[in-house]
Image (cartoon, helix red, strand yellow):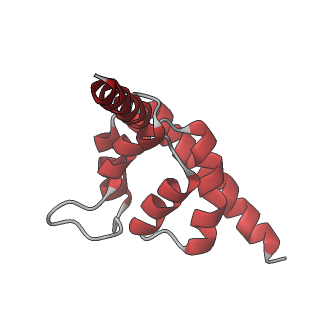
Amino acid sequence: MKKLLVLLLLIAAIAGGVWFVLRDDGVLEQVTEERVKAALLANRLPEPMADCMAPKLTDRLTIAQLLKLEKLKAQDGETALPLSTGEAMARLRRVDDRQAVETLVRVGGGCGVELIMDRF
């Protein structure tokens, strides 16, 4: 009986830990600076730009928005980086989250200006 009680408590503790990690706002669903930076680098953003943008985007994007922004990646038949404004706009439309795109553009623009100003 005592062993059964200990086993049940152990199972309950493991289940609680799993719930804590996998719940909607759990550890796996948190936007971290490292995840954002990795996504930016995976999309061939220069490292200084990714270093600037990642901490700012971390505070402003939800995990759902980060996942939507992954739609910016090149699809079959597309070059890694858009070759025209039309291609860039088509990728932005795929995201289908105006707030996420606006945040990305604002942060990117601000970081671009910061990096240029640092050179002077």
Q: Is residue 40 left or right of residue 69?
A: right
Q: Is residue 101 left or right of residue 103?
A: left
The x, y position of residue 76, in whole percent, is: 14, 63
Foreground residue among 19 and 61 = 19
The x, y position of residue 81, in whole percent, is: 35, 68
| Quadrant of the image containing the C terminus | bottom right
| Quadrant of the image containing the N terminus | top left
Residue furthest out toward the bottom: 119
| Residue at screen point 58% across, 46% down | 58
| Residue at screen point 26% across, 70% down | 79
Residue furthest out toward the left: 76
Residue furthest out toward the front: 1
| Residue at screen point 31% across, 58% down | 73
Foreground residue among 89 and 101 = 101
The x, y position of residue 34, in whole percent, is: 53, 58
**Residue 60 shows in the view:** yes
Foreground residue among 13 and 61 = 13
